[in-house]
Image (cartoon, helix red, strand yellow):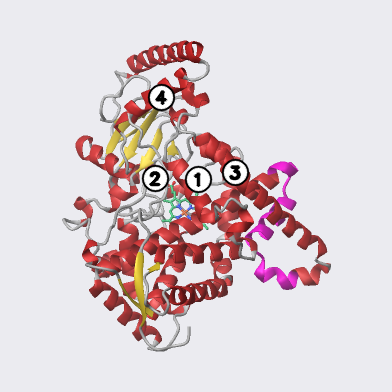
Amino acid sequence: MFDMGFVNLLQNLTLIAGGGGAATAAIGLMATLMFCFFSYCILYQSRRNERLPPGPYPWPIIGNLHQLRLPIHRTLRHLANKYGPILFLRFGSVPTLVVSSSEMAKQFLKTHDLIFASRPPTSVGKYFFYNFKDIAFAPYGDHWRKMRKICVLELLTAQRIESFKHVRQEEVSAMIRSIWEESESGRFAVNVTEAIYASLANILWRILARKKFSDNDLGTDGKGFTDLVREVSTAVGSLNIGDFVPYLDWLDLQGIKRSLKQANTRFDAFAENMIDEHVNARATTNGQAEAEAEAHVKDFIDVLLEMAGTDKMEAKVKRETIKAVTYELFSAGMDTSANALEWAMSELLRHPHAMKKLQEEIESAVGQHGIVKESDLATMKYLQCVVKETLRLYPSLPLALPHESVEAVTVGGYYIPKKTMVIMNLWAIGRDPDVWGADASEFNPERFLRVEEHGMDLSGGQSDFRMLPFGAGRRRCPGSAMAILTVEYALAQLLHTFDWRVEGDPSELDMKEACATTMPRQAPLFAYPSLRRPRRL
Ligand code: HEM
């Protein structure tokens, strides 16, 4: 976690120098730091005449890293309030731009989308995603284009999402039953966060690999998939100093590279088995007819294997790509949607009138004893408002994923150098009072009942930039349709089956966010369920 200010960084350096290698290490470090300092002075001098966007003065070597405090999206908004919606910082030696208004986001993600469609080279891409074999952290280029195309045209199509309807139904029903059992028929508060994560993990694994996995499948160290996703997400959100101060990379000061490599080793063994099982199953499938009969239930790994079979890539690369993309779709699909659900539940618990209004809407759509079907969701306008309002206030990736400029460009009258890292503060954009009014930070789903807001396209299809929970432009989230469907459906079932309450005053519910790449609740959500109608679960 990057809570380390400059003081902590210095402490780390002293510790390393004082250990085994003592004097030699200390001299080496001093030489490195001096070298960095002079390089920085030369670089800064040469840039001072160009009109860079405003920002606080950077320190030598570390730039503005010492100013970052957790949660980073809040610190960056604070700085943006002082310097403006396009704010220039230096993360070590990396020029960094923070975009905090919808107007400016449009400039970067629409007007100049192509220039900012790349990603900076981060340690997570290198050490966890097999040297950038994934989609999200891959730089703009042939690999990204090819994998993104497969993702959009083969994996996340409306037809394929629809073909997994039964999976969502079965797993959400199983979650409802487990909540009721765990609460011992409503006598105890249940860990809603845990139930949501477990259910989404099951949904995602069944879509990706046709079966569910237990945490033991990942190893015997007691750490499961949720721990793995949290570990990687935290490592990414921690900002590895070595990514920004290359001279210090070898020291791995925060232990991030080590933890990413360990996480990769754990996932790799599991993924190898999973792919072997698929390869063997495909080999034993006799004849075209059987394969065709099964075509409608192909899981994502089948599709990726099929694509790899028609591809000229070298065998090893193919396998690494399948592993990287599988993990990415699992974590992107599970973590983000789970965050949205736990925040929606938290806000509804704090706003009982909104919960009741939503329950009434669901009931009038499906009847008192009916079960929510995905086809009912289109008629539930208030449900859609609640999900939009949740994503506005709690975008699952508050800072999106970093973009990088592939060439120098002038935006809004400011010079943006080539290889500038661009951070979109989606959290600040969704809470901008100039766009959303004085109550921008309040949970008020009714604001989306107005025709203009209700029709808002959240998918980042470039028509509306007032809130961007899925980003926009070439790098926008390809999973938005699946995410919205899953979140709306699970939320409707949770509220149609149960009334919910928390211990004590609901307005006092702890709403602090944890700090990773995604934005989960800091403390898990506990609540008491009670059955709304006597029914068989
Ligand atoms: C509520 C749920 C979700 C939210 C809020 C969300 C949000 C985002 C955001 C903000 C980005 C980065 C956009 C940018 O860099 O400008 C992103 C990228 C991505 N998301 Fe999602 N996402 C969600 C669910 C999903 C799901 C269900 C999947 C697939 C199973 C998915 C797959 C991806 C991928 C592959 C990328 C990388 C795109 C690229 O770099 O080309 N996401 N998402």
Which numbered dot is residue 93? 4
Q: Residue 84 location in percent, x, y?
A: 23, 37
Q: Amino acid at mark 2?
A: Leu
**Label 2 environment density (alpha carbons within 10 Å; few <14, some 14–19, many ≥20):** many
Q: Main secondary structure of the magenta part?
A: helix
In this rendering, does residue 349 appear at all? yes
For marks 2 and 4, the one nearer the N-term is: 4
Which is more toward the observer, 527 or 352? Answer: 527
Say which amino acid is labelled 3.
Answer: Asn
> Could you tell me how far apart the alpha carbons at marks 2 and 1 are, in whole angstroms?
26 Å
Query: What secondary structure is marked by label 3?
Result: helix
Dot in front, 3 or 2: 3
Query: For the magenta stretch, what is the residue range?
Result: 292-317
Q: Which residue is mark 2?
A: 109
**Residue 141 in view here:** no
Frontmost residue, 339 versus 381 = 339
Looking at the image, is mark 4 or mark 3 nearer the viewer? 3
Q: Mark 1 sits on what residue?
A: 232
Question: Is residue 195 placed above or below 114 in the rendered structure?
Answer: below
Category of crowding for the residue at label 1, using alpha-carbon neighbours closer than 10 angstroms: few (below 14), some (14–19), many (at least 20) = many
- The vertical placement of 112 against 165, above or below, is above
Please tell me which residue lies in front, 258 or 165: 258
| Residue where numbered disc 3 is placed | 264
CB atoms of marks 3 and 2 within 8 Å: no
Q: CA distance from mark 4 to mark 3?
A: 28 Å
In the image, residue 114 lies at what x, y percent? Answer: 46, 41
Is ligand 1 less than 8 Å from the beta carbon at label 4?
no
Mark 1, secondary structure of its residue: helix
